[in-house]
Image (cartoon, rainbow, N blue to C red):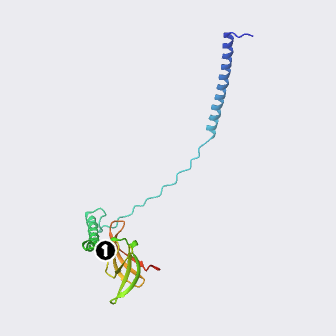
């Protein structure tokens, strides 16, 4: 059996036409099914809730200062300057005095190793860099402008001046406890 170019082209055309014909009918079937589904499916939309009623409130502060007035700003600035003056009064004496030798060491490097009473006054013995120092109430200690306020047999209390997160100078207390078993 011998195929001529015309016979081959004819059979090829027959195969293409039959394939396209099947594809067209399948596509029409698919479009028909999608149309049925679209018509059968109804969207469910829930109704929106009723909006809440807004009841306006009367402004009863006629005699009070308006929140955006110059008078309100002036009061806030006065309050701030008073606070700054109080902060300056807290730190200014510390800045103008001469520093003591034990203020060069941080407080966590200072250890209380003993206490004694000298001329009726309690005295604490502190160790810094393997040297022993005698300190009493009124002496300065540590890098935060610490001033010793009280000395007992087992501890020593300090008042420090430090800056808080807002940059304001505040006072805080610190304590050094007697180091047990020290050499």
Can residue 126 be seen here? The reply is yes
As drawn, which residue projects farthest toward the bottom? 120
For the point 35% across and 73% down, the residue is: 142
- Answer with the quarter of the image where residue 118 lies: bottom left
For the point 67% across and 23% down, the residue is: 19
As drawn, which residue projects farthest toward the right? 1
In the rendered image, residue 55, in percent from the top left (x then y), is placed at: 42, 61
Can residue 145 be seen here? The reply is no
**Figure quadrant of the N terminus:** top right
Quick one: 72 or 93, which is closer to the camera?
93
In the rendered image, residue 154, in percent from the top left (x then y), is placed at: 42, 83
**Left or right of 29, for residue 127:** left
* In the rendered image, the vertical position of residue 128 relative to residue 17, given as above or below: below
**Figure quadrant of the C terminus:** bottom left
* In the rendered image, the vertical position of residue 119 relative to residue 160, given as above or below: below
Quick one: 83 or 30, which is closer to the camera?
83
Quick one: 134 or 159, which is closer to the camera?
134
- Answer with the quarter of the image where residue 7 lies: top right
Label 1 environment density (alpha carbons within 10 Å; few <14, some 14–19, many ≥20): few
- Provide the secondary structure element on which disc 1 rests: helix
In the rendered image, residue 160, in percent from the top left (x then y), is placed at: 34, 74
In the rendered image, residue 150, in percent from the top left (x then y), is placed at: 36, 82
Residue position for label 1: 101
Q: How many marks?
A: 1
């Amino acid at each position: 059996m011998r195929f001529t170019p015309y016979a081959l082209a004819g059979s090829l055309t027959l195969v293409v036409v039959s394939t396209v014909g099947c594809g067209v009918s399948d596509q029409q079937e698919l479009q028909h099914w999608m149309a049925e589904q679209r018509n059968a499916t109804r969207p469910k939309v829930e109704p929106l809730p009723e909006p809440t009623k807004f009841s306006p409130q009367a402004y009863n502060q006629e005699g009070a200062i308006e929140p955006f007035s110059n008078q309100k700003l002036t009061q806030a600035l006065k309050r701030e300057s008073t606070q700054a003056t109080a902060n300056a009064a807290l730190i200014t004496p510390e800045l103008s005095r001469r520093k003591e030798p034990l203020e060069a060491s941080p407080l966590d490097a200072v250890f209380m190793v003993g206490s004694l009473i000298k001329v009726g006054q309690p005295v604490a013995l502190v160790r810094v860099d393997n040297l022993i120092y005698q300190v009493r109430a009124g002496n300065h200690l540590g890098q935060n402008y610490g001033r010793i306020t009280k000395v007992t047999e087992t501890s020593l209390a300090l008042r420090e001046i430090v800056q808080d997160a807002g940059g304001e100078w505040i006072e805080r207390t610190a304590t050094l406890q007697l180091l047990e078993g020290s050499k």
